[in-house]
Image (cartoon, rainbow, N blue to C red):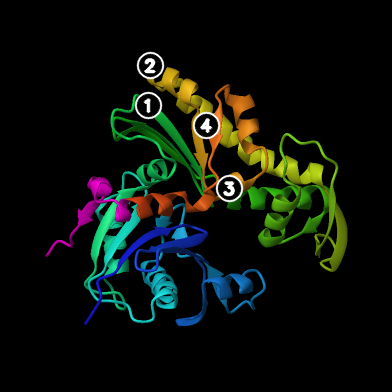
Amino acid sequence: MLIKKTYGIDLGSSTIKVYSFLRNKTYLEKNMIASKGRRIIAVGNEAYDMFEKSPVDIVVNSPMAFGMIANLELQEIALYSMMKKIDKFLGIGSDIFFSVPLDMTAVEKRAYYHVANGHWLRKNRVYMVEAPIADALALGITLEDNPGSMVVNIGAQSTQFSIITDGKIIISKKIPIGGRQMNEAICSEIRKRYSLQIGTRTGKRLKLAMGRLNDQKKDARKVVGIDSISGLPREEIISGYVVNAGIMNCVNEIAAEMKTFLERTPPQIAYHISREGIYLTGGSTRLPYIDNYLASYTGFSFRLSQLYETSSVGGLEKIIRNRELEKWAQPVKQRKL
């Protein structure tokens, strides 16, 4: 007898998050695929281990770009590979809840449907939940009779500002700045100051180790990179000041966009947001003191979530486990041509 299974899935640009109702557990794996021509070499965490270390003929990248599906076929392979690790015997006709971006076109919605009903995953019922709604549910925000709440999600490749009032997203804006751009900015800053080329994985490690924004703690790390002039490997001591300078370029852009967004918000809603505080979530909010830095820039207080990148899938879990919340999930059916 086939068991009906239910999953909540957040296809992130950096990490796939899957909640299994049957196992009552959330699983995370890197959303990366390594391929050589048409042949798949590695998927998930194994592919990420090859990132920036693979030969020229092996391509390692993510099938997502700026929160949207960029390569449908590869995304289906990545999702199927991960779900196969969770449940070896995938039930046909599962219920799959996707956390999706706002304002998607019909083509983009069809892409999510095909990911769940393609070559490997079939006969699944697909439901879509807008990502800011999923974040709000995970953060404990009351959606109905809500005079106004603001949710900011700083992800791997994009940042989303959303204002929710009475269960609806009335204003929203997405900008193409996230954790990956911070990593690249750190690499650019080191290349400019030290004439040393490092990979984005090294940039990420420096960000997590020394990125502090408001904290002026003196810190340094030794890294190995390629000398821009000689082309030979070279060791260098990187100052925390240089790392923070790279990060601040991106964080200042996010803060400036956020301030403009708040200035265009209706006064009565902005007043309630100022009293309640802005909810801050997303994987890139692991950066220490980012909430204090944004508060000093915008003049608003922030409520930093400890869910980080799992906030959207946490909201899907609440919808799956509570039938009263299923009204926030929209069923998607494939149109017959």
Q: Compare marks 1 and 3 and give the one earlier in the sequence.
A: 1
Horizontal arrangement in the rendering, residue 221 relative to residue 158 (left or right): right
Q: Compare marks 4 and 1 and give the one earlier in the sequence.
A: 1
Residue 295, percent from left and from top: 60, 27
The quadrant in which the N terminus is found is: bottom left
Residue 49 visible = yes
How far apart are labels 1 and 2 at the CA level?
A: 9 Å
The residues colored magenta run: 319-337
Amino acid carrying label 1: it is: Gly
Q: Which residue is mark 2?
A: 268
How far apart are labels 1 and 3 at the CA level?
A: 24 Å
Amino acid carrying label 2: it is: Gln
Q: Is residue 110 above or below residue 271?
A: below
Q: Which residue is mark 4?
A: 257
Residue 63, percent from left and from top: 45, 65
Tag 4 and tag 3, C-beta contact below 8 Å: no
Is disc 1 placed on a helix, strand or loop? loop
Q: Compare marks 2 and 4 and give the one earlier in the sequence.
A: 4
Q: Compare marks 4 and 3 and give the one earlier in the sequence.
A: 4
Residue drawn at x 80%, y 45% as measured from the top left: 240
Mark 2 crowdedness (10 Å alpha carbons): few <14, some 14-19, many ≥20: few
Q: Is residue 118 above or below residue 65?
A: below
Q: Which residue is mark 1?
A: 148
Q: Is residue 43 magenta?
A: no
How far apart are labels 2 and 3 at the CA level?
A: 30 Å
Question: For residue 50, which quarter of the picture?
Answer: bottom right
Q: Is residue 327 magenta?
A: yes
Residue drawn at x 74%, y 54% as measured from the top left: 206
Amino acid carrying label 3: it is: Ser
Residue drawn at x 87%, y 58% as measured from the top left: 236
Q: Which residue is mark 3?
A: 284
Tag 1 and tag 2, C-beta contact below 8 Å: yes
